[in-house]
Image (tube, rainbow, N blue to C red):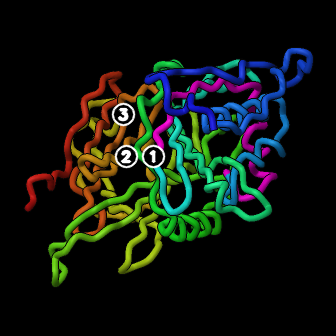
Amino acid sequence: MRQAILATAMSISIAGIAAPWDARAAEPDYLDDRSDAEAVVKSFYNAINRREFSRAWSYFGETKPSANFESFVAGYEGTKSVRVVTGEPGVEGAAGSTFFNVPVAIAATGMDDTERVFAGCYTARLVNPQIQEPPFTALHLERGALKPSDLSAEGALPAKCGDGPPPPARDVELDQAKKIFAASHGEECAPRGQDTQPTEPERYIIKFHNTVSADGGEQEAQLFRFFCTMGAYNEAHYYYQADEVRGVREIHFATPELQIQYQNGDSEGKVEAINIIGYRSDGELINSFYDEATKTITSHAKWRGVGDVSSTGIWLFRDGEFSLVQYDVDATYDGEINPETVLDYNTAP
């Protein structure tokens, strides 16, 4: 394996130059390089740009980037080309394998020539060649997770991607979460048009002490965030949690039902009152993200594109569950962002 993986701090390389798929003469040169983790990522997107989807599929190991090859190909129907930028990988050895976490940002150009940027991390794995038996397993991609960004690909590129992947034992829960998600929301969340979001979920490990348990010792939960759909200004996600007590399950979030009173009954008028008249349980969260530092999930749903009307919920992880602790509402169609907090349990013990 080339020493370039560990050399030249902050090195950045670019591959997969944009090329329309209907202009075969302008397509990028063939690249199939498994000599290091960055090269595998570049080769994957080179195959995407050349519409060699079977080759792109082959860069992943047993865990594939989609439920099946057909849905994988469909996810790129609206994509004309992809430019990829990579950073220096983080390297870690575990259980006879070496894992490489590669910072990645892509600029995806759609068939309408609009460009969208996504950034995140890919994990590549090399099983120690000295202990392998036939058939040989080459360096390959294990997973990838990218988020939308408003920056350029170079600006969005993560500085680093951790020290290594979660231990392989946790992959059992990951596989279960993927199967449950596919069974419950596979059709609803199938890639369409220019959706280039990965079907692999983001995974977080949450360490916590359960204050209601007998021993109060440290416990661990896994949180999985699945991308579902993207509209003009909102994107939807589903969350799954895995722990020793309840196994793998979809999370549903307590959400207030609101009664909004406008002056003269006109929604364009002044808001006179916002009342909580009950609660419902929502599985789908809009424009959401998990903050590892605060152990909170935040959802921000825009009611219209300009973002002057919206609702924002914050759910805090404590004692092994996510609880609603804050809810803000901006119900004034006035062109200004001025939310009002209608529920606040942040001061609760």
Q: How far, Cα to Cα, is label 2 from label 1?
A: 5 Å
Relative side of 203 to 331, left or right: right
Residue 259 visible from this viewpoint: no
Q: Is residue 142 magenta?
A: no
- Tell whether 78 sits left or right of 239: right
Q: Which residue was labeled with disc 2?
A: 299
Question: Which amino acid is tagged 1?
Answer: Ile
Query: Does the residue at mark 2 contact the one at mark 1 (Cβ under 8 Å)?
Result: yes
Q: Earlier in the sequence, mark 2 or mark 3?
A: 2
Which of the 4 image quarters holds residue 211?
bottom left
Q: CA distance from mark 2 to mark 3?
A: 14 Å
Mark 1 — residue?
Answer: 286
Residue 132: x and y in percent read: 69, 62
User: Dividing the image into 4 quarters, which one contains the C terminus?
Assistant: bottom left
- Number of numbered discs present? 3
Residue type (three-letter) at the residue carrying disc 3: Val
Residue 305, percent across and down?
A: 48, 29
Q: Which residues, given as a range, are shown in magenta?
A: 65-91
Foreground pick, 194 / 145: 145
Query: Residue, x 62% and y 33% (percent of image)?
Result: 2
**Mark 1 or 3, closer to the camera:** 1
Where does the image place residue 315, in percent across and percent down from the top left? 29, 55
Which residue corresponds to mark 3? 309
Q: Secondary structure at mark 2?
A: strand
Task: Say above or below: 228 vs 95.
Answer: above
